[in-house]
Image (cartoon, rainbow, N blue to C red):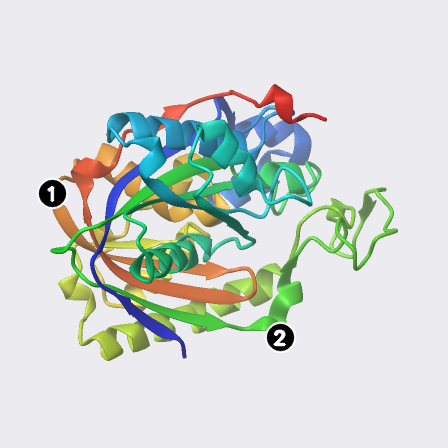
C-alpha cells in the first residue's frame, strides 16, 4: 500500500469558513415527519448543518478562508508558490477552480495551480500532494484550499442524506521549516466500489440523463444529478475496513494510539466515529465529534474538526495528531502530523459570492 514520508514541511495555519444559514434538524419535521427526523438525529448525531446561498459556491468559502489566513499569518501573496483546490463541487467543469482562486486572491502568475476531485479522504490526500510538491521544488509557502457544498448536489427530498451533509470551506498554509516534524502518510484505493457513493449524471458518462426526481425502491426521491450513497455498504466499509487500515499504519510507523494527542476522523457518522475509536482502543475524548453542529462536510470535515476541537475543548500547543479520511472512491487516507493549535484560526461565517464568476 502507498506510504509516504515528507520532511521539512510544516502546517503553519488553518482557517475554516461556514455559511451563515444554519439549518436545524428538527426544522425538517415538516419535510419528513418527527419520527423519521428524530431517528436520523439519534443515528447520526447531526443536530444542524450549514447551507450556502444559491449563488454561493465552494470556492467562495475557500476564498474567504484563504484571505483570512493570509491576513492572520501576515503572508506575502507573491511568496505563495502553489495553490491546490480539493473539491467535488467546482465552479465549472472547466477550467480548474484553482485558477479562479489564484486570480481572486491576487497570487503570482508563477504559482502552480491545480484541482483534486476528491471528497472524504481529500484533505489528507491534498496534504500529501502539496507537501510532496514543496519538498521537490523551491516553493517555500503553499496554500491547500479544501471546500465543499454537498447541499447543492443532494436532493432536498432525500431524507437519508439531506439532513446530514453541510457546506464548508477551509484553507491550510504550509511552509518549509528545517525543524518541522516528519509527516507520514498511507493510502488505500478501492475503485471496485466506485459506485457506492456517486453522482451518476452531470459529466460525460450519462450525458443525457433526466433531471426529473423520482422515487427509488427505498422511497428516496432523487435524480441522476443528485448524490447516491449505498448506506449499508459504506457503513460496513467504515466499520470493517477503516480500523484495521489505521492499525496497519500505526504498526508500520512504530506508533500506537496512545502516542497521539488527538485523533481527527472524517465526520461520517457519530456511531461510526465511536466504533472506530473503540476498535483502536482510543479514549473517545481524543476524538472530537464536530458533526453534531456541522454535519458531514465531506473533504473539509478534518480541518473543521480541528477548529472545533480548539474552540470547544480549549486545545492549545503543539499536538501530535492522527488524521484519517475515508469514504468516496472508496478510499482511505491516514496521516501522522504535528500541529500547533495556536495556528488554527477561529471559525468564521460568510455569504460572500463572486458575482464576476457568472458568465
Q: Residues within 10 Å of mark 2 (few under 14, many from 20)?
A: few
Residue indicated by mark 1: 317
Marked residue nearer the N-terminal end (2 or 1) = 2
Where does residue 168 sit, x and y in percent of width and height? 47, 36
Where does residue 335 sit, x and y in percent of width and height? 31, 62
Residue 177 vs residue 95: left or right? left
Q: Does 353 appear above or below 25?
A: above
Residue in the image at 53% along x and 50% along y:
115
Residue indicated by mark 2: 192
Residue 264, numbered label: none
Residue in the image at 85% along x and 42% along y:
212
Q: Secondary structure at mark 2?
A: helix
Where does residue 55 sit, x and y in percent of width and height? 64, 24
Where does residue 234 sit, x and y in percent of width and height? 55, 63
Residue 158 vs residue 340: left or right? right
Let me know if residue 61 appears in the view.
yes
Let me know if residue 25 appears in the view.
no
Quadrant of the frame with the N terminus:
bottom left
Residue 126 vs residue 162: left or right? left
The answer to whether marks 2 and 1 mark residues whose Cβ atoms lie closer than 8 Å is no
Amino acid at each position: 500500500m502507498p506510504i509516504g514520508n515528507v520532511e521539512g514541511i510544516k502546517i503553519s495555519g488553518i482557517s475554516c469558513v461556514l455559511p451563515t444559514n444554519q439549518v436545524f434538524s428538527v426544522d425538517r419535521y415538516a419535510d419528513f415527519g418527527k419520527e423519521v427526523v428524530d431517528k436520523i438525529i439519534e443515528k447520526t448525531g447531526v443536530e444542524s448543518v450549514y447551507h450556502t446561498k444559491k449563488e454561493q459556491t465552494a470556492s467562495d468559502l475557500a476564498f474567504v478562508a484563504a484571505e483570512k489566513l493570509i491576513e492572520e499569518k501576515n503572508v506575502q501573496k507573491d511568496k505563495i508558490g502553489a495553490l491546490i483546490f480539493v473539491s467535488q463541487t467546482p465552479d465549472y467543469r472547466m477550467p480548474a477552480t484553482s485558477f479562479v482562486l489564484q486570480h481572486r486572491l491576487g497570487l503570482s502568475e508563477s504559482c502552480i495551480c491545480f484541482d483534486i476531485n476528491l471528497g472524504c479522504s481529500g484533505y489528507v490526500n491534498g496534504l500529501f500532494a502539496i507537501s510532496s510538491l514543496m519538498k521537490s521544488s523551491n516553493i517555500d509557502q503553499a496554500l491547500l484550499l479544501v471546500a465543499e457544498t454537498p447541499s447543492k448536489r443532494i436532493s432536498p427530498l432525500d431524507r437519508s442524506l439531506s439532513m446530514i451533509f453541510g457546506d464548508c470551506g477551509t484553507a491550510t498554509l504550509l511552509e518549509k521549516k528545517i525543524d518541522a516534524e516528519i509527516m507520514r502518510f498511507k493510502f488505500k484505493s478501492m475503485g471496485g466500489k466506485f459506485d457506492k457513493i456517486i453522482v451518476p449524471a452531470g459529466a460525460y458518462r450519462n450525458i443525457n440523463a433526466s433531471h426529473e426526481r423520482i422515487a427509488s425502491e427505498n422511497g428516496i426521491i432523487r435524480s441522476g444529478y443528485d448524490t447516491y450513497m449505498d448506506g449499508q455498504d459504506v457503513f460496513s466499509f467504515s466499520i470493517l475496513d477503516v480500523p484495521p487500515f489505521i492499525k496497519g499504519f500505526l504498526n508500520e510507523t512504530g506508533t500506537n494510539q496512545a502516542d497521539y494527542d488527538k485523533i481527527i476522523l472524517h465526520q461520517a457518522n457519530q456511531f461510526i466515529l465511536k466504533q472506530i475509536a473503540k476498535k483502536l482502543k482510543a479514549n473517545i475524548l481524543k476524538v472530537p465529534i464536530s458533526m453534531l453542529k456541522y454535519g458531514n462536510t465531506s473533504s473539509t470535515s478534518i480541518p473543521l474538526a480541528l477548529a472545533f476541537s480548539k474552540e470547544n475543548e480549549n486545545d492549545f500547543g503543539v499536538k501530535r495528531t492522527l488524521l484519517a479520511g475515508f469514504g468516496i472512491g472508496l478510499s482511505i487516507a491516514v496521516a501522522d502530523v504535528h500541529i500547533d493549535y495556536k495556528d488554527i484560526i477561529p471559525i468564521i461565517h460568510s455569504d460572500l459570492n463572486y458575482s464576476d464568476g457568472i458568465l
